[in-house]
Image (cartoon, helix red, strand yellow):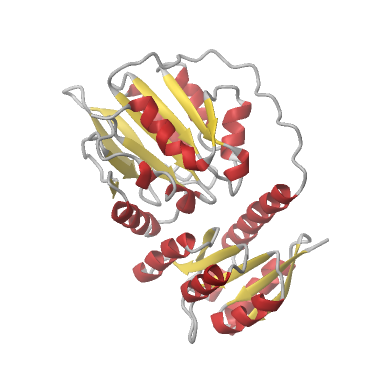
Amino acid sequence: MKKNILVVDDSALMRRVMCDIINSDSKFQATDYCRDGLEAYEKLKHTSYDGVVLDVNMPRMDGLQLLEKLQKEGIRANVVMVSTLTDSREADVTILAMERGAIDFVAKPTNIIEAKGEAFKRQLLGVLDAVLATQKAAESVRPAVKPAAKAPMMRKATGGKNKLVALACSTGGPKALQSVIPFLPKELDAPVVLVQHMPPGFTKSMADRLDDLSKIRVKEAEHGERLQKGCVYIAPGGKHLKVAKTADGNNSIVLDDATPAIGGLKPCANLMYDSLTGSSYDEIVCVVLTGMGADGTNGILSLGRSKPIRVIAQNEETCVVYGMPKAIYEAGVVDEVVPLDEVAQTITKNVGVK
């Protein structure tokens, strides 16, 4: 049976394009559309949809106002935001929207040629597919947990003093990070490097918002800066983040713009983990949260052959999309599987405080 999708956008052209994209996939059907949040609110009060594709900027009631109203009244909906890359205000609002219950977002095309292009189609259908497949799995009877593969030879953490936390996430990540980063102590005895799959513009908004919510310092990473304990460095969208050992034995951020996207991902978590093999850290605590695909697994496997590592994975029940944590779990190198609300304390337990 096809999944019923509600499309909410004040542009008739964008509504048409998005409905055509949704209807082109045999799994989905654009059942209804609305011109603003007020119309959508009236629909959602009386009709249940499998998913809602929601614009940010609209007259009468915008996307954020609609989410706040739905949250206040306890109306559940699987919402994917559509947000313009070029507007920093929309980026800020999109991050807030995920606090208000939106599951993920796609970047809105800036013109009709982009809107009718393959990249936008792939992105929209990919996010809907990942989000709704996971929601369906969550509602069904869960199969028995597949046992982890026989663990490959890894150098396991032994209590070294000079540690780094390296975290990777994708679909559902912006919201999940708000249950992790604000709960890390200001005195965390390690820096944190973080890859969240996001386009340029949104990572700065996410870093600023997390910094507002957190005791620990959070910032978008800058090329060449030294890694400091008690600080979270978020890879900028559109650039790969690597860590390099400096001449004096410390470690600094390298932002790589030249290397193309890997599997459509830039930043790519595998590249981040690979780079850590040349760092001066005694131990790396690898954390994998919700996300589509398997980014991070190969990098962690490579890292574990040359550095002592400890691997923490988010559990299936609390993931929006159980892809990246599943991949690393099935590789057989996970040390701890924990629910989202225990990730921060598990990180802190493993690295300590200054």
- Judged from this view, the residue extending furthest toward the front is 73
Q: Nearer the viewer, residue 341 or 238?
A: 341
Residue 254 vs 49, above or below: the answer is above
Is the C terminus in the top left, top right, bottom left or bottom right quadrant?
Answer: top left
Is the N terminus in the top left, top right, bottom left or bottom right quadrant?
Answer: bottom right
The location of residue 143, given as percent across then percent down, is 76, 36
The location of residue 214, given as percent across then percent down, is 31, 49
- Judged from this view, the residue extending furthest toward the bottom is 60
Residue 30 vs 59, above or below: the answer is above
- Judged from this view, the residue extending furthest toward the left is 248
In the figure, is residue 149 to the left or right of 259?
right
Give residue 334's quadrant in the image: top right
Residue 117 vs 66, above or below: the answer is above
Residue 195 vs 304, above or below: the answer is below
In the figure, is residue 135 to the left or right of 89?
right
Residue 174 shows in this picture = yes
Give residue 308's quadrant in the image: top left
Q: Residue at x 20, y 22 (%)?
A: 249
The location of residue 176, given as percent across then percent down, is 48, 49
Residue 292 shows in this picture = no
Q: Residue at x 39, y 58 (%)?
A: 202
